[in-house]
Structures are given as structure tokens and as C-alpha cells.
Image: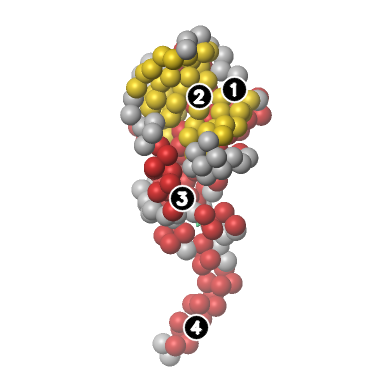
């Protein structure tokens, strides 16, 4: 992997961590710092969808080359990961990220895709202006343009994640609607850690019972 020699393994950031961090920093830390993983309906669906693209393969159809499970990296940003699907329209790569569920706007999916594009640009020395998120349930794609703002956000989040790894502390729980779909809610217990007054009340109740 050209350009990666200068990075310590501990400082490399997985591209998927960008999606996790932008969804919830605590989720990112639980997965990438503490290696916590729990299945729920969303992770099972996600695994099923990714089985379609998790083996490296290369196929050319009607002049377009389709590469699945393509290794990606950026020596400049210290990012590594793989692209579910990268289409090559001539010399221009077009990354496609597979997600379960129906077509919807999710900034964290866009950031993950944009990080893939930035890796491809550096690896292949070309411009990657756009890509798409493919939603398996609705079989629909949503095209994403890689704007300067999106690119800047990818760089900022990569730095935040590296700081998080150095710090080694779990960030506070967001304790909002994001937790409803999070597979880690049982390990995280957001209703306790996100709400100090609840924690205080439960501690008081426990203390009272033990008197
Ligand atoms: S349960 Fe909520 S706070 Fe905890 S990791 Fe998931 S989204 Fe973040």
C-alpha cells in the first residue's frame, strides 16, 4: 500500500469508523476501541446485503468494469478499508456503498462514501466527483456529489477519531432517537449514561434498598 509506511497501525482509521463516528461517537468507540459487537435486525440485514459484495471480483459488462470488495487506502489521511463496489466508467471510478433498508438521506452514509472516493483519488491519481449509496430493500440508488464541505468533514472526523483512539475514553451517550436503531444499546445502556439524573435516582434507590 503505497504511502502507508509512515503510519503506526494504531493510528490508522477504518473508513467504516467515519460512518460510525458521524452516527454516534460513542458507537465508534465501542466498536473500534472496545471491539464491542452485538447483532440486531439491522446488523443481520446489513450482513446479508454485504454478502453480495464482500468477495473480491472483477467483471466487465457493456464497457463498465465492476470491482467488488476493493481494498482502499489513503496515505495522506491514514485511512484504510474496502469499497463494496467500484464501477469504472472509462478511467473514472464511481464508488457504490451497499446499505440495507429503503432509500433515505443519511449524512453518515455520504461521509463513508466520500472517504472511499478520497482514497480512490489518491490511489489512482484521478478525480472522483460522485458515487452512490445503493439501498437494497428498495433496489434504488441515491447519487452523492463529493462537495468540498463533505470532503472537509471527512478530514475533520478522521482527526477526531484518531484523537478518540489516543484518549481511550468512551464519549458520553447521545441518548436520543439514534439509540432506537443502534445494535449496541444493550452494551451502551444509553438511558443510564446519557441521563445523569436517572443514574443518580437509580443509585439512590439501590442504596435505600440495601439499608
Ligand atoms: S445506544 Fe445510543 S449512545 Fe449508545 S452507542 Fe448506540 S447510538 Fe450511541
- Residue at image position (51%, 67%) is 192
> Of 110 and 63, which appears nearest the observer?
63
N-terminal of the pair, mark 1 or mark 4, is: 1
Circles 3 and 4: CB atoms closer than 8 Å: no
Circles 3 and 2: CB atoms closer than 8 Å: no
Q: Is mark 4 within 8 Å of ligand 1?
A: no
Q: Does the residue labelled 1 lie within 8 Å of ligand 1?
A: no
Reading the image, the residue beneath label 4 is 205
Tell us which disc is closer to us: 3 or 4: 3
- Mark 2 residue element: strand
Q: How many marks?
A: 4
Reading the image, the residue beneath label 1 is 130
Q: Residue 172 carries which label?
A: none
Q: Can residue 18 be seen in this view?
A: no
Q: Distance between the residues labelled 1 and 4?
A: 55 Å
- Mark 4 residue element: helix
- Residue at image position (46%, 50%) is 42
Tell us which disc is closer to us: 1 or 4: 1
Q: Which mark is residue 95?
A: 2
- Residue at image position (34%, 22%) is 57
Circles 1 and 3: CB atoms closer than 8 Å: no
N-terminal of the pair, mark 3 or mark 2, is: 3
N-terminal of the pair, mark 3 or mark 4, is: 3
Circles 1 and 4: CB atoms closer than 8 Å: no
Q: How far apart are marks 3 and 2 (CA)?
A: 22 Å
Tell us which disc is closer to us: 1 or 3: 3
Reading the image, the residue beneath label 3 is 42
> Of 61 and 92, which appears nearest the observer?
61
Q: In this view, does 44 lie above or below 144?
A: below
N-terminal of the pair, mark 4 or mark 2, is: 2
Amino acid at each position: 500500500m503505497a504511502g502507508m509506511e509512515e503510519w503506526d497501525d494504531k493510528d490508522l482509521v477504518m473508513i467504516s469508523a467515519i460512518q460510525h463516528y458521524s452516527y454516534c461517537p460513542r458507537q465508534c468507540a465501542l466498536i473500534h476501541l472496545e471491539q464491542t459487537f452485538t447483532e440486531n435486525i439491522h446488523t443481520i440485514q446489513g450482513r446479508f446485503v454485504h454478502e453480495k459484495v464482500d468477495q473480491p471480483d472483477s467483471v466487465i459488462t457493456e464497457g463498465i468494469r465492476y470491482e467488488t470488495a476493493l481494498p482502499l487506502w489513503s496515505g495522506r489521511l491514514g485511512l484504510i478499508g474496502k469499497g463494496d463496489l467500484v464501477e469504472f466508467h472509462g478511467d473514472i471510478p464511481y464508488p457504490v456503498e451497499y446499505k440495507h433498508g429503503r432509500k433515505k438521506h443519511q449524512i453518515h452514509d455520504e461521509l463513508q462514501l466520500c472517504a472511499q472516493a478520497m482514497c480512490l483519488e489518491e490511489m489512482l491519481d484521478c478525480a472522483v466527483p460522485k458515487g452512490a449509496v445503493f439501498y437494497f430493500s428498495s433496489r434504488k440508488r441515491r447519487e452523492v456529489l463529493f462537495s468540498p464541505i463533505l470532503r472537509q468533514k471527512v478530514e475533520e472526523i478522521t482527526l477526531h477519531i484518531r484523537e478518540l483512539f489516543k484518549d481511550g475514553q468512551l464519549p458520553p451517550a447521545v441518548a436520543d432517537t439514534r439509540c432506537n436503531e443502534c445494535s449496541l444499546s444493550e452494551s451502551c445502556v444509553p438511558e443510564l449514561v446519557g441521563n445523569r439524573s436517572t443514574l443518580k435516582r437509580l443509585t439512590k434507590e439501590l442504596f435505600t434498598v440495601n439499608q
